């Protein structure tokens, strides 16, 4: 029994010694103990592998559209993180921001901790809301950059392995390009009848070229140059032009009118003359918010229809004649890949 008495005596002595310590000293000793345990674990890992833990890495990022409302568009993101170590890791936090031409469009974060298995991969899902009120601002930058947008994703994830924290960058970039103005231009001549009987009076629309003009937060100016030929032996007057730009989708979706307007011209077109007429249209940028909802809801696809009408006046032997006619109708299949998914 001497051995037991000695052990008991030591235990009693240790308890009395611990009782005499202040609270601060007790906390310090406890922290040192935890550090020693962590160091022992890290040391054991180093002894077994001969190296410190490898930094985890982001394998891939995937995005997809989620719920869509009048005010917000949900972006569902999945991030795959690989742990190359033979011991488990733990995701502490993750966050990122999506920029379009430098504009912060949406931010997402996750504070829920996730285990990443040893030599394995964990897929972390996040949900982010894009405020649809940002779409007109993005459109202004898109047109201002020649119908080009750079989408840039920047963020980071914090992953811990054996008490060591790694900050892993999350970065990706891709381009979104359109050619709306170019697609609404044509050099294909088109004859338009003003009167078909008793005599035929017509004009030839030689070409229409469209390009962007001034862009503000409220309006986007589009300039159309229309070359018109009068092959008749009498003068014509083009008194005005009217236009409409409509975003359409299959029914039952309702079309969104992006631009409506008219412009007085009073241009005289003499017999055999060819003149260039300039028509300026204005897209209402605030309507782009409604367009965005329909565009994303239909897989980022929109049919943009542009119609241009002209009112012609002609003095005939049997009286004065005035008629509004459709002189141009063009369609552009607008498709985008804003989330950069193949």
Image (spheres, rainbow, N blue to C red):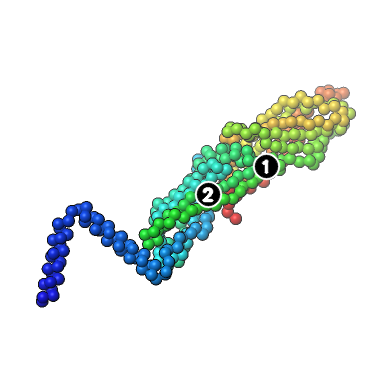
Residue 247 in which image quadrant: top right
Question: N-terminal of the two: label 1 or label 2?
Answer: 2
Residue drawn at the location 39% of the way across and 71% of the way down: 48
Q: Where is residue 17? Give x, y as percent.
A: 15, 60
Q: Residue furthest right?
A: 233
The correct choice, above or below, for 230 with respect to 127 in the image is above
Q: Say which residue label 2 marks.
A: 153
Q: Residue furthest bottom?
A: 1
Q: Secondary structure at mark 1?
A: helix
Residue drawn at the location 44% of the way across and 54% of the way down: 167
Q: Where is residue 127? Give x, y as percent.
A: 47, 50
Q: Quadrant where the C terminus lies?
A: bottom right
Residue 212 in which image quadrant: top right
How far is the residue under mark 1 from the one under mark 2?
Answer: 26 Å
Question: Left or right of 8: which side holds 307?
Answer: right
Question: Left or right of 138: which side holds 39?
Answer: left
Mark nearer the viewer, 1 or 2:
2
Q: Say which residue label 1 marks.
A: 180
The correct choice, above or below, for 263 with respect to 56 in the image is above
Question: Local crowd at mark 2 within 10 Å, few (<14), some, or many (≥20)?
Answer: many
Q: Secondary structure at mark 2?
A: strand
Question: Left or right of 35: which side holds 305?
Answer: right
Q: Quadrant where the N terminus lies?
A: bottom left
Residue drawn at the location 52% of the way across and 55% of the way down: 61
């Amino acid at each position: 029994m001497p051995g037991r008495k000695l052990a008991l005596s030591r235990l009693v002595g240790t308890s009395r010694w611990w009782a005499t310590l202040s609270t601060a000293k007790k906390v310090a000793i406890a922290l040192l103990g935890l550090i020693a345990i962590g160091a022992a674990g890290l040391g054991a890992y180093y002894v077994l592998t001969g190296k410190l833990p490898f930094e985890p890495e982001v394998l891939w990022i995937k995005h997809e559209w989620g719920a869509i409302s009048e005010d917000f568009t949900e972006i569902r993101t999945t991030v795959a993180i690989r742990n190359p170590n033979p011991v488990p890791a733990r995701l502490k936090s993750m966050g990122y921001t999506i920029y379009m031409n430098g504009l912060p469009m949406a931010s997402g974060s996750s504070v829920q901790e996730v285990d990443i298995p040893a030599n394995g991969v964990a897929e972390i899902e996040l949900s982010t809301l894009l405020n649809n009120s940002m779409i007109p601002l993005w459109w202004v930058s898109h047109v201002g950059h020649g119908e080009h947008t750079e989408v840039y994703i920047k963020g980071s994830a914090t992953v811990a392995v054996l008490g060591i924290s790694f900050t892993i960058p999350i970065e990706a970039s891709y381009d979104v390009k359109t050619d709306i103005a170019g697609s609404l231009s044509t050099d294909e001549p088109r004859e338009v009848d003003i009167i078909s009987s008793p005599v035929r009076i017509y004009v030839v629309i030689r070409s229409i070229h469209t390009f962007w003009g001034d862009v503000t937060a409220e309006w986007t100016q589009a300039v159309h140059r229309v070359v018109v030929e009068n092959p008749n032996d009498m003068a014509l007057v083009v008194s005005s032009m009217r236009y409409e730009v409509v975003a359409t989708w299959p029914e039952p979706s309702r079309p969104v009118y992006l631009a409506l307007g008219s412009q007085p011209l009073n241009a005289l077109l003499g017999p055999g003359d060819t003149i260039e007429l300039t028509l300026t249209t204005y897209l209402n940028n605030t309507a782009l918010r409604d367009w965005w909802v329909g565009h994303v809801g239909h897989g980022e696809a929109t049919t943009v229809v542009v119609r241009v009408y002209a009112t012609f006046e002609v003095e005939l032997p049997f009286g004065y004649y005035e008629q509004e006619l459709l002189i141009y109708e063009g369609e552009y299949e607008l498709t985008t890949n804003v989330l950069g998914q193949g």
